[in-house]
Amino acid sequence: MAQEAIPAFLSGGGELASLIAAYDWSRTPLGPLDRWPQSLRTTVGLILQSPVPIVTLWGPDGIMIYNDAYSVFAGGRHPQLLGSKVREGWHEVADFNDNVMKVGLAGGTLAYQDQELTLHRSGRPEQVWMNLDYSPILDEAGKPAGVIAIVVETTAKVRAERSLRVTADKLARLNADLEERVAERTAERDRVWRFSRDLLLVIGRDGIFRDASPAWKAILGHEPEELIGRSFVEMVWPDDARATVQAHEGLLIEGQLLCFENRLRHQDGGFRWISWNSFAEGDVVYGYGRDITEEKRQAEALRLAEAQLRQAQKMEAVGQLTGGLAHDFNNLLTAISGSLELLDQRVRQGRLNALDRYMTAARGAVDRAAALTHRLLAFSRQQTLDPRPTDVSRLVLEMEDLVRRTVGPAIALIVDTPPDLWTTLIDANQLESALLNLCINARDAMPRGGHITIEASNREIDDETAGAHDMTPGQFVLLSVTDTGVGMPPEVIARAFDPFFTTKPIGQGTGLGLSMIYGFVRQSGGQIRILSEVGLGTTVSLYLPRHHGQEQATEMLAITQAAPRAKRGETVLVVDDEPTVRLLVTEVLDELGYTTLEAMDGPEALRILQSDTPINLLVTDIGLPQGMNGRQLADAGRELRPGLKVLFITGYAENAVIGNERLAPGLHVQTKPFSMEALASRIKSILSGS
């Protein structure tokens, strides 16, 4: 492979750099070079620059990647060892390497001095001795992903030491041989020192420079001679000084420091990112650091690109939501405006005999619009809920007949709910609607029939499970609906809760069913999960938080059909910045015999409240202009008139008015849209005290 084709992290790595670049890594669990994780790239780049025999054992199988020095140590096993599993590459010491991988991938380290092993490096067994140091390599998540091994063969030394005990003559010859070897190693060290493209240094335990390689000038612009006698911390970027001091202290205790990153000052006033590998021997620390500034820049560019992608995905979701919302509301507005237009034409033409058809059409469109906003509020977890202690088991059993009739005779329904099910604090009506919706979805997923199973159970969610499911730990009631239908692929599951997303044909689904259930369950403090496999079916599970209390009977509220006209003298102050709403509300109140006062914003209404005019009820919108909202107006009004009754009318959800608190006595909420009949009944009920 041409030199220019070698990836940057392999540059200057000698013979092994070329072999690694040319190797077909796609045949190994590591995959192609361009898909290697940064932690692996950095580690390989570092070991290639080292004169010490170093091998990286990556992944559970310990895939072997090593440097030129290690290839010499491997002897006839090179280059076959490259890319092999360590257990297979050195099969004669497989058990020894199994223990190395087990300890290293668990985060531990191993060190052996003069370890004796029998290796087959030249086709025959030979007895060797080595100093071996094994340390875990951490991936981007901080977890051990491999093991780095520093291999220094001490066979000659061990044999020499044994020979020393034989004769003085052999000792003399051995000393001469060792001196020659030391001279050779010193010459090699000098060459590495002079020509290394990494930062090499020697410092004392006190952190004072004793020597620095010429690369300090090339990388950081500092003359090596100027560094001698100075503290290493002086070269560290201020923000990294504390971490560097702590790392140095740890190095003195542990004896080595691998893949430590910090920033060093450049002569131009800037900094460079350096990745360090350091070793302590006696009162001296040896370190070599690689410039990873460009790698850091690339990582930051990738992070920014990912952030831009997430923003684009978010805007795509917003576009889908607004597009679906605009589509549905445009349809509804067309129905309303068309009905009103025809009403206007028929009235002007004097044709009054069929007006109820157009009024019914307009009212129907208004009801569908109200249902749409209700579902959107459910999705956004802002709907008005009425949570009460509920026995889910009894709720499911009471709904069994309704579900059977809904899903039809082609579907077999199985219900399994234990009698000792915990109580949960939930809006029972919303839960019934959610359960029925899930069963209808299950039915639609089984056009040729099948089975639906409704199950409930008590579940204790621990910290680990809660973290995996985006929940808080604790006790939950699990309610699940399982079908034997067509199932969903992963890409559909990922979007199942998106509003307006549906896999049903046009006209057969709004795409708001599951999103509404999701919002309701999350607003109730629970979680919803989907498990599905194409062709095998789907399970939708609702986790509902346990409530330590007894179930309460559901209270049914009846709206009276008729009521006497208002007592003379009762006055209602109506505050809304929308003139049409004020017109309709005051018309209803006038019909009921109340005296009405109007205001279009908070300050105007407050002036009326500050007057001597008797006011029995304040009806106010929440969102008002002029710097005073409806809640602030109500608070000010009740300060001026203690006990003043207030009815909030709002297009927002109830908890947007009161938060998570309960309304104080005398305060009430009516969410828009509402019928005039419902508003009249509510006002009469409030003023009568019923």
Image: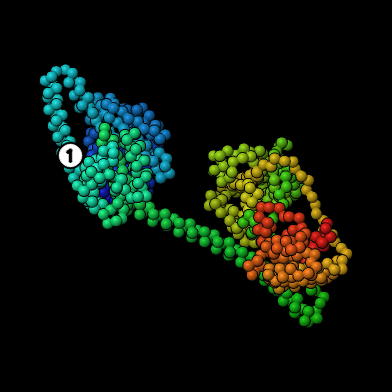
In this image, 139 relative to 542: left or right?
Answer: left
Q: Nearer the viewer, residue 251 or 46?
A: 251
299 shown above or below 328? above
Relative image position of residue 70 (x, y in whole percent): 25, 36
Mark 1 element type: helix
Circle 1 crowding by C-alpha within 10 Å: few under 14, some 14–19, many from 20: few
569 shown above or below 264? below
Extreme residue toward the top, this view: 166
Extreme residue toward the right, this view: 564
In this image, 339 relative to 44: left or right?
Answer: right
352 shown above or below 400? below
Mark 1 = which residue?
A: 188
In this image, 115 relative to 601: left or right?
Answer: left
Query: Image quadrant of residue 95?
Result: top left
Which residue: 77% across, 59% down? 643
Q: Nearer the viewer, residue 291 or 141?
A: 291
- What's the residue type where badge 1 is placed? Glu
In this image, 148 relative to 473: left or right?
Answer: left
Relative image position of residue 226 (x, y in whole percent): 21, 48
- Colour mapping: rainbow
The quadrant of the image that shows the C terminus is bottom right
Relative image position of residue 165 (x, y in whole percent): 18, 18
Residue 584 visible in this rendered orientation of the protein: no
Q: Nearer the viewer, residue 337 or 629?
A: 629
Residue 656 visible in this rendered orientation of the protein: yes
Which residue: 64% across, 70% down? 626
Which residue: 19% across, 47% down? 225
Relative image position of residue 606 (x, y in whole percent): 71, 68
